[in-house]
Amino acid sequence: MKILVSNDDGIYSPGIKALANAMAQIADEVIIVAPDVEQSATSSALTLRRPLRYKATKLSNIAANIKAFRVDGTPADCVILGVHNEGRPDLIVAGINLGPNLGYDVIYSGTVAAATEGTTMGIASIAFSIGLDDDDINFEFAKEYAKKTALHVLEHGLASRTLLNVNFPAKKPLGLKLCRQSTHQWDDNVVQRKDPEGKDYYWISGKPIGTDEKDADYHIVKSGYVSVSPLHLDMTEYKTLKKLEILMNE
């Protein structure tokens, strides 16, 4: 059994080592293919206007059945090159992202995009993220839930064009809950400043906007549970499609 691991925090992130080591306990072969530098919020961007470099990389504190490669591109690039160079895996996992990917975060997340890219190839894929607090991150509980989820997907598969988005709370979870995607988003703020030459530059920032949707991912993770949300690549809004049929008669 072969599992491909990627992320958007970069190949040296402790989260990807934790995830790869967890997968190494259930797979014969684990391949890490990840960006050489952080690629957060790159979504599903592909590098099409320059060549990409794919280099074998030595990582410390990883299991013997793990190979690692770094790519000077995006998470989606990494998945494409990983499948091309190492062969089709049985499962693609992304993460463990340093910070949650809840609600509308999935639109921007490079970690979710890596799982999305695998899904477009017809490969079962899961994205994993973990909440942050002021303490050092403890990946041990996340590794156990990641193994459990991966084994379930390997045994039962996923529906066509469907991936799983899994989020861990910062502390030891109270349990696991299946849920829908929330409407959590960010209150965007643009900071305008001057560079040393007096020219304007801009920095996009913001703060998270929570929701009170008790059946959705944001509230569930904030309540101390692991959230597992199936996401689908078909973004068609079918009710509106039906309503638009009136245009055909005008």
Image (tube, rainbow, N blue to C red):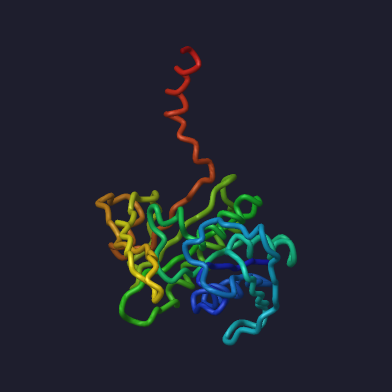
Figure quadrant of the N terminus? bottom right
Is 236 or 219 nearer to us in this picture?
Answer: 236
Please tell me whether residue 183 is drawn above or below residue 31 in the rendered image: above
State which quadrant residue 139 falls in: bottom left
Quick check: 54 left or right of 41? right
Q: Residue furthest left?
A: 212
User: Is 195 left or right of 219, judged from the image as shown?
Assistant: right
Q: Residue, x 49% and y 75% (percent of image)?
A: 15
Residue 137's image quarter?
A: bottom left
Hey, which residue is sitting farthest bottom in the picture?
Answer: 60
Q: Position of residue 234 (x, y in %)?
A: 53, 41
- Residue at 32% in and 57% down: 188
Q: Position of residue 127 (x, y in %)?
A: 51, 61
Q: Which residue is drawn at the image coordinates 33% and 60% (left, top)? A: 190
Q: Is residue 204 left or right of residue 61?
A: left
Q: Residue furthest front?
A: 197
Residue 122: x %, y % from top left: 65, 50
164, 69: nearer the viewer? 69
For the point 50% across and 71% down, the residue is: 9
Instruction: Inspect this view and state whether residue 1 appears.
Output: no
The image shows residue 176 at horizontal and vertical percentages of 39, 61
Residue 120 visible here: yes
Side of 52 where 45 appears, left or right: left
Number of residue marks: 0
